[in-house]
Image (spheres, grey):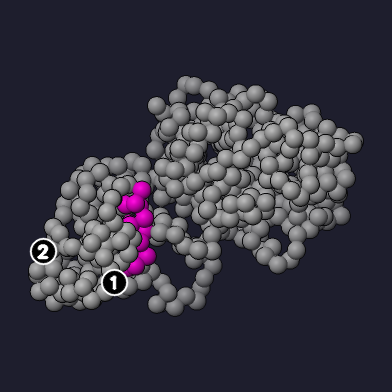
Amino acid sequence: MKVSFAAPALPPSGALVLTVAKGGTLQGLAAEADAAASGALSKAVAASRFDGEAKATLEVTAPSGLDAERVLLVGVGAELDARLAEDVGGSVYSALAKSGSESAVLVWPQAGSAAAVGLGAALAAYRFDKYRTQLKDKDKPTLGELVIAAPDADAARQSYEQDGSKIVEAVGFARDFVSEPGNVLYPETYAEDLRELEAIGVSVEVLDQTALEELKMATLLGVAQGSAREARVVVMRWEGAEAPPIALVGKGVTFDTGGISIKPSGGMEEMKWDMGGSAAVVGAMRAIAGRKAAANVVGIVGLVENMPSATAQRPGDVVTSYSGQTVEVINTDAEGRLVLADLLAYVIEVYKPRAVVDLATLTGAMVMALAHEYAGMFSNDDELAASLVSAGEAVDEKLWRFPLHDAYDRMLESHIADMKNIGPREAGAISAAQFLKRFVGETPWAHLDIAGTAWTDKARPTVPKGATGYGVRLLDRLVRDVCER
């Protein structure tokens, strides 16, 4: 959907969107429009339960005296800020998407948040209809353009073009990858698709099976050995500053059957999004490079498919990681940590980052703990953890910090190797983080378990059902806050 900006005015056609503060009183251009419509708008408010509550909407079709084909009243509550503006924009798009209107003008009263309302609307407009060939016309969106009529139109346009539009593209980029089925997106095709980032200045290096064998990334390769699809690791670099980089690491299991420790069949089709951590990293790299961030960032993703076969890794196998530590594989469905272990050790040794953040749809235990509202965070560095929480709050990608402790670490003790890849059932997300901690040394590090936030069955104002793109905005904001100030 196209988003543009203009000075406040009533439109000559299409839909007109007017904001209403808590209490339901029409003010400014809303009052003028109501007068032109002989009070039809205020009468509609009085006859409904609409009172300007934030994100609530009320539609009035073809009001006499106005050129607009419909008027949508949208509540902005009592205290309007940029974060709420995004949600209002998303609510407006959702209300008008299939209305029949092809364009809309949203009269926005507040200077400073007009770009945010456009961002929210554009994020809400995301759809993945690539494989739907029989959609009925009534199910297809009609709204193709939203004009934000605001007092700071020029400043809002500049802000949106420089930053907002880049976020929309990056989140859509990530959502597309997570939405693709496993027969289309697998390690080789995923890696080749990431070369698209070179067009915006990202250096992209693809490590193939032979290179990974030479590097002795055995924990990562062990996950992939049951599949006909060879593993790939993709290293992406954005060098916008001369400083030690911040490293972003993503789990990219393009399909996860669980391997020999096979998952139950019910819901297994959802395991196409077990690469959500990698999608967050590649989306963040696109956002960072798209806005030409003054930062040095390296992103690395491990792309594998976890399948059962005659060549698959067995429970009880012992593998030697890139770091030299040995791992007894107790459960082949605890595979994401094996992928991340080699990536973490490699990126720290080769690029010597100032800090490392990894993201992974790692454990069902995290969903049990936090449902789909927060992602879990584990960190060995309080300053990095605080920066991540702050970044998450700013973009509504919330984090909740969990503990790391030697008592949990002891759950991973093996009788024949340096560690097991899984502990007992209890505290499963914590013991998984403790496993990863063994591969980062003293480098400031945070692990984000996004198992409950990478996909949603319930739409939110700026997040349609399906792939959320969780982590893209969080990482982009972290880079802004930590590297660009």
| Residue type beneath disc 2 | Glu
Is residue 39 rendered to the left or right of residue 370? Answer: left
Q: Of label 2 and label 1, which has the lower sequence position?
A: 2
Name which residue lies at 17% across and 74% down.
43
Which residue bears the numbered disc 2?
32
Q: Is residue 292 above or below residue 369?
A: above
Which labelled disc corresponds to residue 49? 1
Q: Residues within 10 Å of mark 2 (few under 14, many from 20)?
A: some
Which percent across, then down, holds residue 288? 45, 37
Choose between 183 and 422: the one closer to the eye: 422
Q: Nearer the viewer, mark 2 or mark 1?
A: 1
Res. 74 visible in picture:
yes
Which percent across, then down, holds residue 395? 42, 45
Q: Is residue 126 above or below residue 318?
A: below
Q: Taken as a whole, is the magenta stretch helix, strand or loop?
A: helix
Residue 352 highlighted magenta (yes or no): no
Helix, strand or loop at mark 2:
helix
- Between the residue at mark 2 and the residue at mark 1, the CA separation in whole angstroms equals 22 Å
Quarter of the image where the C terminus is located = top left
Name which residue lies at 61% across and 38% down.
378
Name which residue lies at 57% across and 40% down.
401
Q: Which residues are magenta?
A: 83-96
Name the outermost residue toward the right.
416
